[in-house]
Image: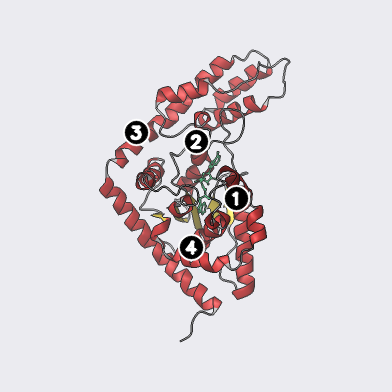
Amino acid sequence: MSKNKEIVMSGIRPTGFLHLGNYFGAVKNYVRMQEEYECFFMVADLHSLTTHPDTKGLKQNVHRVLAENIACGLDPNKVALYCQSHIYETSELYLYLNMLAYKGELEKTTTFKDKARLQPDNINAGLLTYPVLQTADIILHRAKYVPVGKDQEQHLEMARNFVKRFNHRYGEVFPAPSAFNFGEELIKVPSLDGSGKMSKSENQYATIYLSDDDELIRTKVKKAKMDSGPKEMNAMKSPEVENIFLLLKLVSSGDTVKKFEEDYNNCTIKYGDLKGQLGADMVKFISPIREKVNSILEDERYLKQVMEQGAEKSRKSAKTTMELVREAIGLKYF
Ligand code: TYM
């Protein structure tokens, strides 16, 4: 890999099938970035243990996330595509960073509060220190850019704070990482029920997965919540309708979006047609990816080779960083 390319790192938890939110918030940027940057992309299997302690389906889920990334266009020969747990240095860096992270700030993290509410019987320390582990993932490669969706913004702010503290206490080792989306605001792909975002493990009927078959995609879109239609010319859109237009902009052509915008503004829009078009364009977008995922999943030997190759590239970078870290902290006694 080239020495002077800027470094990029990101990850996805193997907690379920990938959906349009993961694609447009993260993977689409990974694919674009692989051409210009030195990229490290991983399956965050350790993070998944904070919420999914039952590991029966883990192997299958890890394989699927890898296959989905590759089917979306990620090239394991261009990037390091690896599994978080294969890089032991991550856990060591996580431990050092834990000494720089304070209980108060961790307890205030939105994702911690949300997850604690969802699993009151399992508010484990891993859940609390989740952003610390995420920071270790990122700075292990001294990455500068982190392509993620809007929901990860706070974690990236925390990563910058931890980096500042480390550099202040031990000397400049790490660049400050920032959340990245090609020249734009970070993206939040909304769910089809008009509230919240698409998610791997919640509101499954309002989320479109890359694994959904054509019929299911059309049915989900058809059932999307709408209002009773515009009452006057150029009316403001309700949040539900706004969401549908946002999704249309992601998968449909500019002309299609323009036509429905005009129909909405002059009150001739038929929501049935809008949903029909959106369903058809989603099917057109997703079905080739789904087919590719299925064929990649059949080849376990290939996936093993991808993981080994990715781990090797990633370990090399991790080892260099950890030498600097141990030295900076003062853990060298001879
Ligand atoms: P995860 O697995 O929840 O999501 C993976 C990526 O998909 C994005 N995403 C979305 N973007 C837009 N709209 C949505 N509805 C939507 N849902 C998910 C997420 O922002 C993310 O980019 N903590 C991370 C995993 C992680 C990580 C890292 C990320 C572990 N270590 C280091 C970056 C760097 C997570 O839970 O992602």
* SS state under label 1: helix
Task: Give coordinates of residue 175: x percent, y percent.
Answer: 58, 64
Specify whether residue 328 is in view.
yes
Earlier residue among tags 4 and 1:
1
Choose the circle earlier in sequence order: 2 or 3: 2
User: Which amino acid is tagged 2?
Assistant: Leu
Kind of element beneath mark 3:
helix
Q: Are marks 2 and 1 in contact (CB under 8 Å)?
A: no
As drawn, 37 above or below 223 = below
Q: Which residue is mark 4?
A: 141
Q: Which residue carries the number 3 mark?
A: 291
Residue 52 got which mark?
none
Q: Residues within 10 Å of mark 1 (few under 14, many from 20)?
A: some
Split into 4 quadrants, where in the image is the N terminus?
bottom left
x then y, percent, for residue 44: 45, 52
Amino acid bearing label 4: His
Q: Which mark is residue 20?
A: 2
Residue shown at the point (55%, 15%) measured from the top left: 272
